[in-house]
Image (cartoon, rainbow, N blue to C red):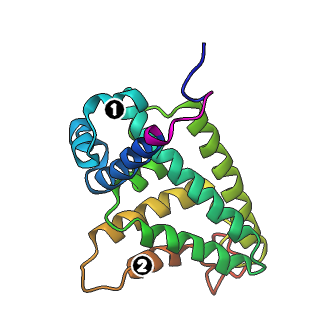
Amino acid sequence: MTTERQRPLRADARRNRERILQTAHEAFAAEGISAPLDEIARRAGVGPGTVHRHFPTKEALFDAVVREHLEQLTRDVRTALEDPEAGPALFAFLSRMATKADAKQDLTEAVMAAGGPMSAETEEKAARLRELFGALLARAQEAGEVRNDVDAADVQAIVVAALTAERRRDAMHRPGRLAEVVFDCLLPRASDPDGQRA
């Protein structure tokens, strides 16, 4: 049986899909997964039926938005891995995440793997991102730029804390400032140069 994924979309259908995704991105960014599907359709300038043809459920649409985030994060991690400065590359990647996620609930939920079960394709992309991020973290630890008593899961929790801090920051403060404060906890302690707990 032929599916939409197996054959190319017509130009108008492709434009509709891209418009729906962009609108969903903005809606989920502002409201999280609670954003109503019919409202997303209205903002995209299409009928609810058009949305359902591309994304049968709101969870499927959210999954597609999460997948786009994961793909972008994966590209960012690959770029960071090419940087010869392991520590600065890691912290620049984390800071970009937090700054871009200012007031974006969907990215926070994506990092936390929230919003309902992810599709097999999205789970695969998330697993690849975790693998690459683990390599980025290990490289920074080997360079002595990050404490050695944290693992990728610890850093994921710290990233979520930084995202939350950025969402709640006062508008008077520079974007990324609170994230930098949170990420300071990853630095090796001066009294313990190899990053191990005392």
Q: Position of residue 193 (x, y in %)?
A: 71, 82
Residue that mark 2 sits on: 176
Q: Over which residues does the magenta segment extend? A: 6-13
When the figure is inspected, residue 125 is found, relative to residue 120, above or below; the finding is below
Residues 141 and 197: in front is 141
Above-or-below relation of 111 to 169 = above
Q: Residue at x 26, y 32 (%)?
A: 48
Number of the front mark, 2 or 1 = 1
SS at mark 2?
Answer: loop
The secondary structure type at the circle numbered 1 is helix
N-term mark: 2 or 1? 1
**Amino acid marked by disc 2:** Gly
Please give left or right for residue 75 compared with residue 39 in the image.
right
In the image, what residue type sits under mark 1? Thr
Q: Is residue 145 visible?
A: yes
**138 with respect to 151 (left or right):** right
Pick the quarter of the image with the N terminus: top right
Dominant SS in magenta: loop
